[in-house]
Image (cartoon, rainbow, N blue to C red):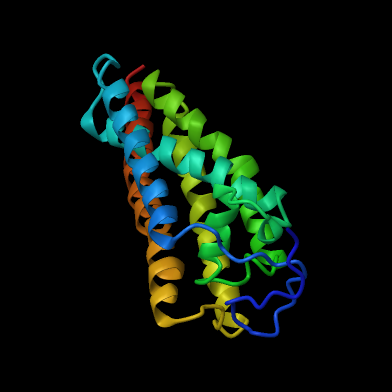
């Protein structure tokens, strides 16, 4: 089955997508699978982190966040980066369906916007593995865990800022309707604004406290 010249639902309507194949799966199926799998992943990490000796609830929550965002970066965003023809898939490949659906909120994805591909590429290849390293570092109380988390968060905040700012500079007209604009473009991405911000504050306080203790010990020698 090959569909050539099939009309697509994206904005702008004159966006060229040769070989485009319409979405096979329903919105509820796509969102439900992602939400359900994410919940199970977070639940698994919450339970697993409970076996870590002398770990705080804050660190357990952080481990849940890092495993979730890390696999999201590597699996979901990694698929987008390394599968430029996802919109041509003639069978219901779930990850391809996710991006065809999400593109209703931001057509720069299906249109392979260079800026979006670049940001997502860095996120998938560098930040994704770093998130998993953060899970390990927290569980094993590594000295670098706060610096690592701070660095990842700054990268996420920078990438999110570039993502939104470039959309504004290009006219901010990539959604098929206000619903998809707010549900996908705004809501689905806002987590990577306030959560990294809170983690930056948390890590900053811990780093400052550690430096202060170190300086006090140095003065008493």
- Which residue does the image show at 37% across and 26% down from the upper left? 214
Image coordinates for residue 206, horizontal then vertical, percent? 33, 36
- Which residue does the image show at 39% across and 77% down from the upper left? 179
**Residue placed most toward the observer, 220 or 151:** 151
**Residue placed most toward the observer, 146 or 41:** 41
Q: In which quarter of the image is the N terminus?
A: bottom right
**Residue placed most toward the observer, 221 or 201:** 201
Tell me if 221 is positioned left or right of 16 in this view.
Answer: left
Q: Is residue 206 visible?
A: no
Direction front: furthest residue: 1
Image coordinates for residue 209, horizontal then vertical, percent? 31, 35
Give the image quarter of residue 216: top left
Residue 142 position (above or below residue 130) = above
Image coordinates for residue 175, horizontal then vertical, percent? 51, 78
Q: Is residue 84 visible?
A: yes
Q: In which quarter of the image is the C terminus?
A: top left
Residue 55 position (above or below residue 25) = above
Residue 172 position (above or below residue 94) = below
- Please state the total of marks drawn on the protein image: 0
**Residue placed most toward the observer, 63 or 141:** 63
- Which residue does the image show at 46% across and 69% down from the upper left? 185
């Amino acid at each position: 089955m090959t569909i050539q010249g099939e009309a697509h639902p994206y904005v702008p309507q004159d966006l060229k997508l040769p070989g485009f194949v319409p979405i096979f799966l329903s919105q509820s199926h796509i969102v439900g699978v992602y939400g359900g799998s994410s919940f199970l992943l977070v639940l698994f990490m919450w339970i697993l982190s409970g076996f870590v000796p002398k770990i705080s609830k804050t660190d357990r929550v952080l481990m849940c966040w890092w495993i979730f965002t890390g696999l999201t970066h590597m699996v979901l965003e990694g698929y987008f980066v390394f599968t430029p023809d996802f919109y041509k898939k003639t069978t219901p490949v779930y990850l391809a369906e996710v991006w065809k659906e999400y593109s209703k909120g931001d057509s720069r994805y299906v249109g392979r916007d260079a800026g979006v591909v670049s940001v997502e590429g860095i996120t998938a290849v560098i930040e994704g593995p770093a998130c998993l390293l953060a899970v390990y570092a927290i569980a094993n109380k590594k000295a670098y865990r706060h610096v690592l988390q701070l660095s990842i968060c700054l990268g996420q905040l920078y990438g999110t800022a570039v993502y939104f700012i470039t959309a504004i500079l290009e006219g901010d007209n990539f959604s098929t309707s206000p619903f998809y604009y707010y549900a996908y473009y705004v809501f689905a991405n806002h987590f990577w604004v306030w959560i990294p911000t809170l983690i930056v504050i948390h890590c900053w306080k811990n780093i400052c406290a550690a430096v202060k203790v170190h300086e006090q010990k140095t003065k008493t020698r």
